[in-house]
Image (spheres, rainbow, N blue to C red):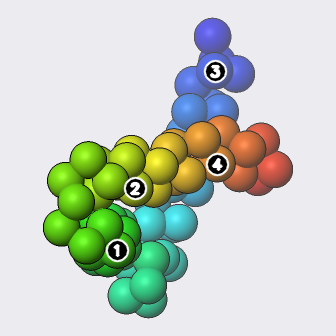
Amino acid sequence: MMAVQATTLVLIDFLMDLDAMLATDPSFISGKWIGDVRQWSDDNGTYADFLDYNAWNQVHLSLPWLLLKVC
């Protein structure tokens, strides 16, 4: 159980550092990035939803891979 708690603390510390680092560059602020993605849809709601879904998937699907590299 101690190993899980220790790993959790390392993960939380890493995520906080990553968040602080990425917040220094407007290109990595997810709200702006997702908003830009939705603008590419040319007011097509279905396409905007599709682009939004794929953009969030890139964030969520790549995070476990990044964590494996760090931990």
- Secondary structure of the residue carrying numbered label 3: helix
The residue carrying mark 2 is 51
Badge 2 element? helix
Q: Residues within 10 Å of mark 2 (few under 14, many from 20)?
A: some
Q: Are marks 3 and 1 in contact (CB under 8 Å)?
A: no
Q: Quadrant of residue 8?
A: top right
Q: Amino acid at mark 1?
A: Trp
Label of residue 22 in the image: none
Q: Are marks 2 and 4 in contact (CB under 8 Å)?
A: no
Q: Nearer the viewer, mark 3 or mark 4?
A: 4
**Sequence-first tag of 4 and 1:** 1
Provide the residue designation for mark 4.
Answer: 62
Give the x, y percent position of residue 27: 44, 85
Between the residue at mark 2 and the residue at mark 3, the CA separation in whole angstroms equals 36 Å
Q: Is residue 47 visible?
A: yes
The residue where tag 3 is placed is: 4
